[in-house]
Amino acid sequence: MTVRAFRLSPGLKVASGLFLVVWSVIAAFPLVWTALMSFRLPLDALSSDPMAVILGPVTLARAGGVSVVDLVAVAVAAIAAWWLPARHGAAGARLLAVGGMEPLGWVLAALLYAVALGIVGLLVLPPLVGLVETIVGVLPLVGGLAPPVVGFTGEHYEAVWIARGFHKEFVNSITLTVGVVVVSLSVGTLAGYGLARARTPIAFWILVTALIFRALPHSVLVAGYLPPFLNSHEILQPLWEMPVLGPVLGLFSDTAPTLYGQPWAVVLVLVAINQPFTIWMLRSFFLSVPTELDEAARVDGCSQFGAFWRVIVPVMWPGVITTGLFSFLLAYNDYLVTSLLLDQANKTMVPAISQFLGSDNTTTDQIQAVAAAVSVTAPLFLLVMVFQRQIVSGLTLGAVKG
Amino acid sequence: MKTRTLLWFVAPSVALMLVFIALPLASVFWQSFFVTRTLFQEVTVESCQPGFLTQTCTTELRSQPILRDGKPVTERVFVGWENYRLVMRPDALVAAFSPGGGGWADVRQIDFWRALRFTLTFTLVTLPLVIGLGLVIALALNTAIASLRGPIIFVSLLPFIITPVVGALSIRWLFIGDGILTAALRWLTGENVIMFAQGWTIEVLLLTYRVWHVAPFAFIVFYAALQTVNQDTLESAVVDGASRFERLRYVILPHLAPFMVFVALIHLMDAYRVFDEIVGFSAQAHHISLQWLTYSLLMPDGSGSRAIGRASASSMLTMIGIVALLIPLLVRTWRDHHQKG
Amino acid sequence: MRQGFNRETMGMFKTLMLATALTVAVASGAQAACAFRNETPIRMLAASFPAWKAATDAMAECGNFQAELDLQFRDKQPAAMAAQPARYHIAGLAVNSLVPLLDQGTVRPLDDLVAKYGKDLLPNQLIRIDGKVMAIAILVNAQHLMYREDIYKQLGLSEPKTYDELLTQLETIKKSGLVQYPLGGTYRAGWDLATEFVNLYFGYGGAFIGAGNVPTVNNTSGQRTLEMMKKLTAYMDPEYLASDAPYVAKQFQQGKIAVSNLWATRAGAMDDPKESTVVGKVVMAAAPAAVPGGKPATTIWWDGFAIAKNIPDAEADTAFRVALEGIDGEMVRANNDLAVWLSKDYKPGRAARGAAESAQGGATPYPATTAMGLMQTALAQNLPGFFTGAQTAEQTLARIEAAYTTAARERGLLR
């Protein structure tokens, strides 16, 4: 962008650059530090000496470490992992867009990328680096780069993912989140579109009520759910015994269900809590889509829904993706609802972490919790890497204009 | 669009909100006027508890609930405004300001007013900081080299996307005890700063954490909005000899105004129900928020019962507060709606 | 990486293989070390700490068993046990969390099951209320004194018998500069702080509840307790209002504190070389008395289990048998130092001395009543104000009584 108006004097340029550097450090530091802790034994990780956390002397002595060669390799791999989706992500998504559905292409590309990253990072890279290390180790001048210098241990990740079965919680989290995003967007796009095109005061009142609903403290709602969720079998059973409704409901389940511990019930709760934000975002987005588009379709004889389906759906994806990301964050990061309404069999990652952090645990458990916390963040990293441009363009297209 | 068509479009969404938000809310409103009591009887009971090798048995007069069909007998009593009175304590409020009372110092001894004080400070202080920081980052980034923008956006978004539980955890560990940042502060100031030992440092930490967490959201919204600033207007402003500040003041900021309202709206709502940070930093000895007050009343106490009546009253009061804060923004929305309609 | 990552990866694969093998083994029904093969799905909710982890792992050996270890189990348990049918067959509980279940009538008497299967149970494991066995205790727990023997020897100090004695010792330790803070206290605002108050208050001979369920905490014992607690805080980490048991244990392990009144379930961790820099240096002893010649100022707690009432008798029968498998001799022998187990196979070691001496010294068992539950909550909510300096001791005690009275009226205890 070479707009003259945004061009800066040298002094201001330095100041603005410096500010960005400082901000980036502040933004990233807590997470980088936490990640560093997760690779150290408790004695290093919880030490008050920062150098102990950075270099991990105890970890180096007891559990081994990494060499300069390893660190260089990881840095190169990280830069490549960043550069690849940023440069070729869009092309990959277009390639994978089955039947012209761009969002599907994005989702497939993200999945493929995640799998590839896992394979390269865990299976290809370690032996490769080991080989380089052996070669460097016997060379005269650079030999010092090969022996381990910084403490490193993967045992906390191993304990979390394998011994403690964190992969189950990972699958639960992903299932729940995908459920919330899909339902929330399906229900929300319809409502958002309707509200954007309606001219009655009802639309306004629905929006304002939704706004107030969004402001509600969640603890109020959540505590209200617990007793009915536990006793829903008794409460709902009369519905199942009603003459007409009963047989219809009987198609879904033989008796009235106990909602407590049912992932789909939690999906509905999270969708409802998220609905106000979703319909506001999408309504604003649909306001920026010219009315002429669907009016033309109406003139051609489409019903309102037909117009929505044929004309609006194809152009709505930027707004939907951005809104979907916010739904994803809400569902994936939720603690209050999932910890209270789900049980052990379908517990998600975030409540599992705070369980790790229990009032009665050892320092090893605490570092395992840190490792779990870092693991939880990884999919969010990936998400932002892949969708970063979509977020900006979705917001640019007017999804948030009050 | 016809009203009937509209209703079909919004039906699933509205149904979900009715069942999972409006219904619980209505029951909360209803319950704020009631108290459910268990009927107790005094019985002499011998109970035995384990010691290390021996057993201690005591015979004592115990209050036990009267059980009928295996369930305790309860009575539901309409108490009018009693729950609200117990939460707001108007009597203590009057006493504080009557001659001989302690004034504000006394008011801050009452949990509800203490919570309200903190919640309002938290909301109103972080609001300009979040908007200001978000704006500065967005403006700075807009002038950065194009190839660096991607990585900087990515890094900037990290505090926002991070799971709140994880975020609070990592910040807590950076500061508590001899946490790395406390040590750094000590080195910088030369004073023995202990972050979790007194009220004001915790308050600063709570506010800073929230600004760190939410500023990226403001930033990304503003940055997206900056991409749609009318370039022609800007160019002609340059031609007219407008200074950098004037261009910011008269072209860019007016363009960003609706986005600021959006961010302010979202932030007001989220900050007013602050809760995670209080728990994450175990700040409750020094500061509590309104949602924390409601939550602590709702959680079962040592006898397994929940103060549902008082919790409902407290949450209704919280709601009234947030609606009052939102009124200016709601009025604006109403005007917009009328203009568009 | 040669030493670090590759070994890790190999280890990871091995564990993965092992995990797969284990899954297969469980799925095919080959249970290890369980007296019978369980066919009925049994569920349990308990607190989350290492002793419960060990016990529930042993129960899982019988198959078809699912344990939910949750820190917030107290928030869920009453509602979950009251559901029809009960959400959990077995309720893992501590002395105070049995009260809500008794009040609701959602746990069943166990006399018939004890007669049928309980031949290995010790008599003091049976928790009797009104003559009926309502729960089975599996371990006892108490906060007791732990101190650094090396520091005490170096400074020529002897084991403190009273809190006043401890105070003078703390002053000596502080002056010596050997540790960062002389004392560690689990004074985190809320439940922890309330429990510390309860310990000392009993030490001063106070009583919380009087006849007719009126509060009786606003007295000289209460004031002396608060004064002593305030004096002790002068020797603690200034962040004591955010310090819970794991945090204090961590400070102990890192050699930052010299003395603490800590839970018995933490004692074992002091000698864990993986985490502790003070292995073999920490000695466990009875909690000091509040007054000269008094009983140790602490309360004795127990953890155990109860069986739900809202389930069929056959399931209750199975659940009881599964639960007993969790505390069999094999488990106790394998996890001897994890807790002070109530089992004839338990060998009291170095770590158990503090709890044992406190109990034998006549420490008060924690009084599990409905009124005490309300009192504990009133303490938890109102004590912090005293320590932040917002209220005086008298104001604090008056606030505690007022909060208790409000809650007791709503509960129906006070008319």
Image (spheres, rainbow, N blue to C red):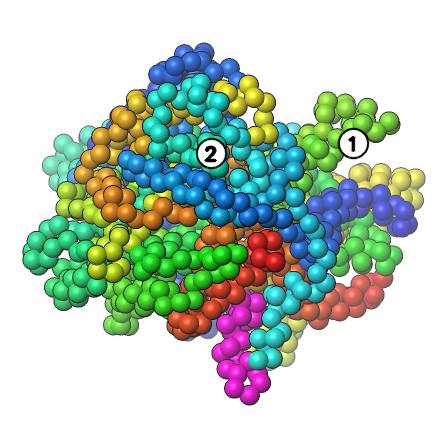
Say which residue appears at 54% left-offset and 76% top-offset.
B107
Indicate yes or no whether the magenta region holds residue C181. Answer: no
Q: Where does the image place residue C9, in percent across and percent down from the top left?
A: 31, 28
- The quadrant of the rendering that contains the N terminus of chain A is bottom right
SS under mark 1 = helix
Q: Amino acid at mark 1?
A: Pro
Say which residue appears at 38% left-offset and 40% top-offset.
B57
Q: What range is drawn magenta here? A: B96-121
Using the image, determine if residue C209 lies above or below residue C315.
Answer: below
Determine which residue is flagged by label 2.
C131
Indicate yes or no whether the magenta region holds residue B111. Answer: yes
Instruction: Using a 10 Å C-alpha cutoff, classify the residue at mark 2 as few (fewer than 14 neighbours), some (14 to 19) or many (20 or more).
Output: few
Disc 2 to disc 1: CB gap under 8 Å: no
- Find residue B308 and name its label: none
Q: Where does the image place residue B152, in percent across and percent down from the top left?
A: 46, 55
C252 or C298, nearer to the observer: C298
Instruction: For residue C86, say whether it is visible.
Output: yes
Q: Where does the image place residue B300, in percent across and percent down from the top left?
A: 54, 49
Q: Amino acid at mark 2?
A: Gly
Using the image, determine if residue A199 lies above or below residue C21.
Answer: below
In the picture, measured across the screen, residue C18 lies left or right of residue A137, that is right
Q: Where does the image place residue C360, in percent across and percent down from the top left?
A: 25, 43
Q: CA distance from mark 2 to mark 1?
A: 41 Å
SS under mark 2 = loop
- The quadrant of the rendering that contains the C terminus of chain A is bottom right
